[in-house]
Image (cartoon, rainbow, N blue to C red):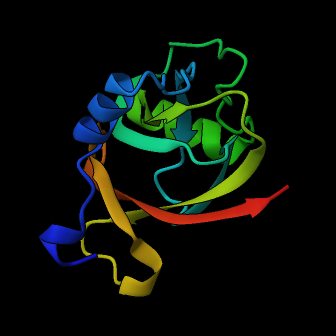
Amino acid sequence: MNNPEEYIDFAKVLQEMGRAGVQPQARVIQIWKYALHPYEQIQKLTMPRGSFLLSVGTQPYEELPFYEGHPAPDPSAQYHETYSKFGQVMYLWAMVDPKEPVVRRAVVVVETGVAISNEELGLLVGAVRLSGPDGNYVAHVFDSGREEEL
């Protein structure tokens, strides 16, 4: 759909549906957050199918516990050491429909200067900067769009 004339004007479609007495089906969505590991390039997150990845950012490491639907960081020593080193956790926020079946969604985290095939990337969600005793770390997070059934 590279031709602008092929794009659908959803606002116009919904307006026309309303005039015809057809009500679009309402959906309840939620915003969930997912912890990301800064040094793991391809991460498979468990989330409802068709989730829309909104943004990435950080929150202080102390902001625990995690809530249902928001997976906690891996409690292994490697993850704990990384999170406590930066004092922050890198998160991805997604708009989800909790009624959809759960799938594994591939997200790619690439540190500045690291080589990776462009076939792995997908759409840029955003960039995150972590500051620690060893200096700054900047990661770029991409949505591969790949979903696997559980």
Q: Residue at x 72, y 37 (%)?
A: 100
**Quadrant placement of the N terminus:** bottom left
State the image quarter where residue 71 is shown: top right
Left or right placement of residue 94 versus residue 147 in this view? left
Left or right of 117: which side holds 15? Answer: left
* Residue farthest to the front, as pictured: 20
Residue ID at (67%, 14%):
67
Residue 138 appears at what percent x and percent y?
Answer: 26, 53
Q: Residue furthest right?
A: 150
In this rendering, position of residue 148 left or right of residue 5:
right
Q: Residue at x 24, y 70 (%)?
A: 6
Frontmost residue, 63 versus 12: 12
Q: Residue at x 64, y 25 (%)?
A: 70
Which quadrant of the figure contains the C terminus?
bottom right
Q: What x and y, as percent, mark residue 46?
A: 71, 45
Q: Nearer the viewer, residue 70 or 1?
A: 1
- Position in image of residue 55 (x %, y %): 34, 39
Left or right side of 135 for 109: right
**Residue 130 seen anywhere in this rendered image of the structure:** no
Q: Nearer the viewer, residue 136 or 126?
A: 126
Q: Is residue 79 visible?
A: yes
Residue 57, compared with residue 124, is above or below; it is above
Residue that sits furthest to the left in the current view: 4
Asked where in the image residue 75 lies, by quadrant, the reply is top right
Above or below — where is 61 with respect to 101? above
The image quadrant that residue 99 belongs to is top right
Q: Position of residue 51 (x, y in %)?
A: 55, 43
